[in-house]
Amino acid sequence: MVSLIELIKRCFSAASERTGRIAIACVFASACAPAMACGPYQVAFYEFGALYYQTENGGAGIDKELVDELVRRTGCKLQSGVDSRVRIWNRMETGALDMTVSGIATPEREKFAVFLPYITTRNYVLMQPEIASLVTTQDAFMKDSTLLLGVVKSFRHGKYYDEVVETLRKQGRVVEAADYPSLVRIFQAKRVSAILGLPTSLAPLLGVVKGVSVQQVADWAMTDDVTGSLVLSRQRMAAKDIEAFRLALQAAREDGTLDQILHRHLQPEFARLVRMGQHPVARVATR
């Protein structure tokens, strides 16, 4: 590596004394300039079972711990907040938000955001106890026009369940909630016959919501996995920072950190239904 003194000598020999002085100033400025900082960026969480929930000490959950780990590895500064999923996607699309979590990629969303995958699972159906004992198949549920399905507005559930939801919506049998806590309240009030949820969202309900048991959980789409990703704004985030998060996420996948985070927040019977870091975090074009 060329030393600072040698670089200065070359500057003098290549130009006049006045030009050399300018070159010296440039060399010292470059040598002393700090590396470009990462952030501050705004990240929005949404309350959704074990992914993110409130405690007396603040936010917690798989997504919260993941973001904390990525901040530790990248040194990036983040300002966090909590919002509804509907408003989060609107803010991402309009360029008013930098980052969110456990988002499902669609062609429309990939136009304004980069998706870095980290969690894979699929949706399950949680039915009311009095219905679960009578309606034992998806076909029986679909044929009974009195049964209503509750979902969170703007959620994507994977190709299979998205088609199921659309079919029921056309029949006027879908009730939408603004967020997951609201959906749980609708379920508790028995305004719907069933709700869709991931293992990360259903697990916290068992033993907490009166009358809910694992016997009420049905698997209608055994191969329709969905992958949640870290969602980074193409418009607002620097390409170098997106790459820094990608590398940090890939490293956490490879050293087992992602799996450790999962098992700290889910019981074993539900953790086996979720895969952290199943997909490599491939580099993607940011613009």
Image: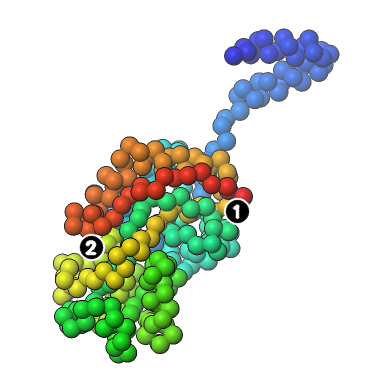
Q: Residue flagged by tag 1: what amino acid is it?
A: Gln
Q: Taking the image as drawn, is residue 196 in sight?
A: yes
Query: Callout 1: few (<14), some (14-19), or many (20+) C-alpha neighbours within 10 Å?
Result: many
When the figure is inspected, residue 187 is found, relative to residue 198, above or below; the finding is below
Q: Position of residue 277 (x, y in %)?
A: 36, 47
Secondary structure of the residue carrying tag 2 is helix
- Quadrant for the N terminus, please: top right
Residue at 75% across, 14% down: 11
- Using the numbered discs, state the Cα–Cα distance from disc 2 to disc 1 in whole angstroms: 36 Å
Q: Nearer the viewer, residue 107 or 255?
A: 107
Report whether 3 appears left or right of 52.
right
Q: Nearer the viewer, residue 17 or 99?
A: 99
Give the tally of numbered discs.
2
Query: Callout 2: few (<14), some (14-19), or many (20+) C-alpha neighbours within 10 Å?
Result: many
Residue at 38% across, 76% down: 164
The colour scheme used to paint the residues is: rainbow
Q: Which mark is residue 58?
A: none
Q: Position of residue 176 (x, y in %)?
A: 39, 78
Query: Contact (CB < 8 A) between labels 2 and 1?
Result: no
Report whether 200 appears left or right of 249.
left
**Mark 2 or mark 1: whose residue is earlier in sequence:** 2
**Residue holding disc 2:** 203
Q: Determine the image quadrant of residue 10.
A: top right
Residue at 62% across, 22% down: 31
Report whether 38 appears left or right of 177.
right
When the figure is inspected, residue 19 is found, relative to residue 214, above or below; the finding is above
Q: Position of residue 264 (x, y in %)?
A: 24, 49
Secondary structure of the residue carrying tag 1 is loop
Q: Position of residue 59 (x, y in %)?
A: 33, 55
Q: Residue flagged by tag 2: what amino acid is it?
A: Ala
**Residue holding disc 1:** 235
Q: Taking the image as drawn, is residue 43 in sight?
A: no
